[in-house]
Image (spheres, rainbow, N blue to C red):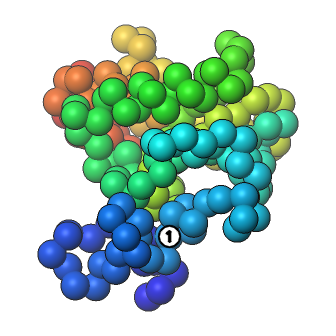
Amino acid sequence: MKFLSCFRRPLEDPERPLLNDGYQAGCVFCTVSKDNGFAVEYEDEELIVFRDRWPRALEHLLVIPRRHTVSTVHELTAADIPFIERMAARARSLRPGNDVKLGFHIPPMSSVHHLHMHVLVPPFTLLGKVQYPVRMGEDGGKKWTWFVTPSQVVSILENGGTIGLKARAGKKA
């Protein structure tokens, strides 16, 4: 199924077509550029930041790695923490403010399987309020939800967990 070609498959899988090192055929985010019609606001050798085509808030940006090395937050490990922190720092530098919401959808709620962080500046649309819920536990960790903040991702990974719908900071999923 071509429309699912962006799902990560093992490297030895012959059905996993790569365009070049770090680019996966069929992945819309692997083709992000101004030339391809994306409203790119920032790019460097590691990250690209662009406006979401279907904004769910007054401003809705996406921060993606330039290379397709991870498809979803579920695949992240503790080794990815510095990268997640750089993604969040770039987002905060572009859209500072305490009311700005940063986060990732957790599969199966991810629509594009190329790691991407949402940057949402209120006010939110009605659908935006439903699609991007942040639930904090008493300990600052994540409660059951399909949206996770960068700080929740870091906390879960630091404590040996994996990111999932039920993952909580400090506990393995």
Horizontal arrangement in the rendering, residue 25 relative to residue 43 (left or right)? left
Q: Residue furthest front?
A: 45
Q: Position of residue 166 (x, y in %)?
A: 34, 40
Quadrant of residue 111 in the image? bottom right
Horizontal arrangement in the rendering, residue 48 relative to residue 106 (left or right)? right
Q: In the rendered image of this protein, does residue 63 appear above or below residue 142?
A: below
Viewer can see residue 16? yes
Residue to which mark 1 is pinned: 27
Residue in the foreground of this view, choosing between 37 and 170:
37
Q: Position of residue 17 (x, y in %)?
A: 34, 80
Quarter of the image with the N terminus is bottom left
Which residue is located at x 72 percent, y 65 percent?
35
Quadrant of residue 132 in the image? top right
Viewer can see residue 100? no
Q: Position of residue 69 (x, y in %)?
A: 34, 55
Which residue is located at x 23 percent, y 39 percent?
77
Q: In the rendered image of this protein, does residue 40 appear above or below residue 108?
A: above
Which residue is located at x 56 percent, y 27 percent?
90
Q: In the rendered image of this protein, does residue 170 appear above or below residue 105?
A: above
Q: Identity of the amino acid at label 1?
A: Cys
Quarter of the image with the C terminus is top left
Which residue is located at x 32 percent, y 48 percent?
74
What SS does tag 1 mark? loop
Is disc 1 surrounded by few (<14), some (14 to 19) or many (20+) residues within 10 Å?
Answer: many
Q: Residue furthest bottom?
A: 1
Q: In the rendered image of this protein, does residue 68 appear above or below residue 149?
A: below
Residue in the foreground of this view, choosing between 153 and 146:
153
Residue in the foreground of this view, choosing between 75 and 139:
75
